[in-house]
Amino acid sequence: MTHHPDSARHGSTEAPSTVWTGRATNRVQWLLAAVGAGCMALGIQLAVDSAWTSGIVPLLMSVIGCVAAGLLMLFGTLAFVHVAVKVDGDALEVRCGHAGLPRRRILLTHVVGAEFAPTVNPRQWGGWGYRWRPEQGSAVVVRKGEGLVLRLGDGRTFTVTVDDAEAAVRFIRDRLHLPAPGPAAGA
């Protein structure tokens, strides 16, 4: 859901908004977090209810393995349940999950272009989460769908999936005084 505080209506004398915020959520991640919690519960169950007759080493390995796998799945998925994007006059800030970590801040002075991507697929990036691919740049992908692609001054790109990405692109282009993409030449 996108919120545009103090946004001006077309034709009004109000000042345009100075901040754009957007968000994207992936409910499937909650299912994966539940699986992680189940692994942790299994590890705890093994530690508490086991008769310890099979030896300490196999049981300890099972308990540690279940708890470790559960923690990795639980916290790894909860970090990417949703993403919040904020663009103000100075920078674009991306915060992931409930704790806001990982976080990425890109100064608008480093941005040379902004484009709308109608479909960003996690498969393109190797899955959900914070991704880096040498041929594509970096991305925060929490779900399949529309996204915002920033072209940076150093030649890299940064992609983030966010609802109403077209509005974010317009907002960034207005801030940077970039022309809107026009029809293809020769059309």
Image: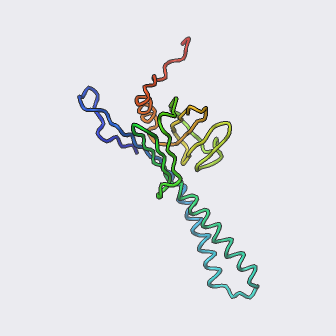
Q: How is the image coloured?
A: rainbow
- The foreground one among 184 and 139 is 139
Quarter of the rendering occupied by the N terminus: top left
Q: Please tell me whether residue 119 is drawn above or below residue 37 in the rendered image.
A: above
The residue lying at 44 percent from left, 33 percent from top is 172
Q: Please tell me whether residue 159 is drawn above or below residue 170 in the rendered image.
A: below
- Occupied quadrant, residue 68: bottom right
Q: Please tell me whether residue 134 is drawn above or below residue 176 in the rendered image.
A: below
155 with respect to 178 (left or right): right
Q: x%, y% of residue 17?
A: 32, 36
The residue at the far top in this view is 186
The residue lying at 30 percent from left, 36 percent from top is 7
Q: Please tell me whether residue 62 is drawn above or below residue 35 in the rendered image.
A: below
The residue lying at 42 percent from left, 25 percent from top is 177
Q: How many marks?
A: 0
Q: x%, y% of residue 11?
A: 26, 26
Q: x%, y% of residue 12?
A: 24, 28
- The foreground one among 152 and 76 is 152
183 with respect to 39 (left or right): left
Quarter of the rendering occupied by the C terminus: top right
87 with respect to 151 (left or right): left
Q: x%, y% of residue 31?
A: 55, 60
The residue lying at 34 percent from left, 40 percent from top is 4
